[in-house]
């Protein structure tokens, strides 16, 4: 059996110019989703070359997973330097960004330390990522980009800082934080679908499907003692109706009746799969509940992607 050899490709041969080649390429939805999958971010409302005073940030977007918080991306197709470190801080303050992503070809150790220090000494809502851009090919294959994380937020330190300054978590917030912590830990062993996700006190966690039109929400609903896996379609009722035309096929593959919601007064439409058994006062079934939830999320994602492709929306 012949096995190909993985070879490194000089990224400058793929993108000769940082601004006009790489930034333009990265800003396209299908390419930005590659980075998003690595970081657990769903990018929306993407803009390039945004002015902050007399400076320009390469890419500014919103994080669909975190209530449209601002994300900035600064590209540097060379070794990291002090100039760009200063730029990302300037851009973050000027745009009130929550997520700051600095992409380089090689991260110097002093800049890794600087990003680590920023993550450990800022509030939990502010997150810095230092990414090394690589590219590889096998034989004569097309080169494939790879975003390798050099530094990222340390959730243990972040959460410790948050808890020490915020003593007011209510019962539901504390229960949700505990559930997500355990669910992410379980998921990391079984699947990459929640790669690099952070636990929070929110009732939802989002999963990107590679397009800003649609996403999966995992929603903890203690009031109704259930977990809902929701396919959320925003501002696109035509797409909902296209999927609804496959309703019988989708439900046959799922093996379960789904709750199809398309209210006239709302911009979004939803397809809901419900898993009973959530009780914040009794976690004795959490192992089984988390296993079932993760399994269904992975399975439903594959099914929805299949039918989204049939509608021409992926």
Image (spheres, rainbow, N blue to C red):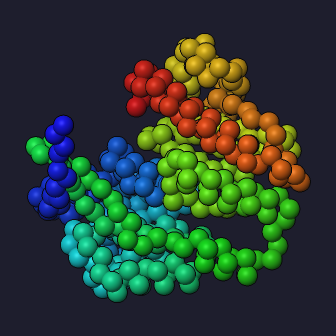
Instruction: Say if residue 236 shows up in the picture.
Output: no
Give how far across and how far down residue 107 sits, in percent: 30, 76
Q: Is residue 277 left or right of residue 18?
A: right
Occupied quadrant, residue 140: top left
| Residue lying at 80% horizontally and 77% vertically, measured from the top left | 167
Image quarter of the N terminus: top left
Q: Is residue 158 left or right of residue 306?
A: right
Image quarter of the C terminus: top left
Give how far across and how far down residue 73 sits, in percent: 37, 65
Eyeballing the image, is 164 above or below 227?
Answer: below
| Residue lying at 28% horizontally and 63% vertically, measured from the top left | 133
Occupied quadrant, residue 67: bottom right
Eyeballing the image, is 123 above or below 307?
Answer: below
Eyeballing the image, is 63 above or below 269?
Answer: below
Q: How many marks?
A: 0
Instruction: Say if residue 112 shows up in the picture.
Output: yes
Residue furthest to the front:
1
Eyeballing the image, is 133 above or below 28?
Answer: below
| Residue lying at 65% horizontally and 20% vertically, measured from the top left | 255
Q: Nearer the viewer, residue 162 or 54?
A: 162
Give how far across and how far down residue 279 sits, in percent: 85, 47
Give how far across and how far down residue 305 sits, in percent: 47, 30
Residue furthest to the right:
281
| Residue lying at 37% horizontally and 71% vertically, measured from the top left | 150
Q: Nearer the viewer, residue 14 or 28?
A: 14
């Amino acid at each position: 059996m012949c096995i190909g050899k993985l070879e490194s490709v000089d990224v400058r041969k793929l993108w000769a110019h940082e601004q006009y080649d790489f930034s333009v390429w990265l800003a396209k939805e299908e390419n930005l989703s590659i980075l998003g999958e690595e970081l657990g971010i769903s990018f929306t409302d993407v803009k390039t070359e945004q002015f902050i005073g007399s400076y320009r940030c390469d890419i500014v977007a919103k994080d669909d997973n975190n209530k449209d918080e601002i994300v900035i991306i600064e590209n540097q197709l060379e070794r990291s330097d002090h100039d760009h470190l200063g730029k990302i801080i300037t851009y973050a303050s000027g745009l009130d960004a929550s997520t700051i992503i600095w992409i380089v070809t090689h991260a110097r150790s002093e800049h890794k330390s600087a990003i680590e220090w920023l993550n450990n000494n800022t509030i939990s809502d502010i997150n810095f990522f230092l990414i090394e851009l690589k590219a590889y090919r096998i034989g004569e294959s097309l080169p494939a980009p790879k975003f390798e994380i050099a530094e990222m937020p340390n959730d243990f330190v972040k959460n410790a800082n948050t808890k020490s300054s915020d003593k007011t978590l209510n019962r539901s917030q504390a229960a949700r934080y505990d559930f997500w912590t355990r669910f992410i830990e379980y998921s990391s062993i079984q699947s990459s679908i929640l790669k690099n996700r952070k636990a929070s006190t929110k009732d939802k966690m989002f999963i990107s499907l590679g397009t800003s039109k649609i996403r999966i929400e995992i929603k903890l609903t203690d009031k109704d003692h259930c977990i809902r896996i929701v396919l959320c379609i925003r501002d696109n009722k035509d797409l909902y109706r296209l999927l609804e035309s496959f309703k019988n096929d989708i439900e046959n593959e799922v093996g379960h009746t789904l709750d199809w919601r398309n209210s006239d007064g709302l911009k979004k439409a939803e397809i809901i799969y419900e898993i009973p058994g959530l009780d914040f006062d009794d976690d004795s079934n959490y192992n089984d509940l988390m296993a079932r939830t993760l399994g269904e999320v992975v399975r439903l994602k594959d099914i929805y992607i299949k039918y989204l492709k049939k509608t021409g929306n992926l």
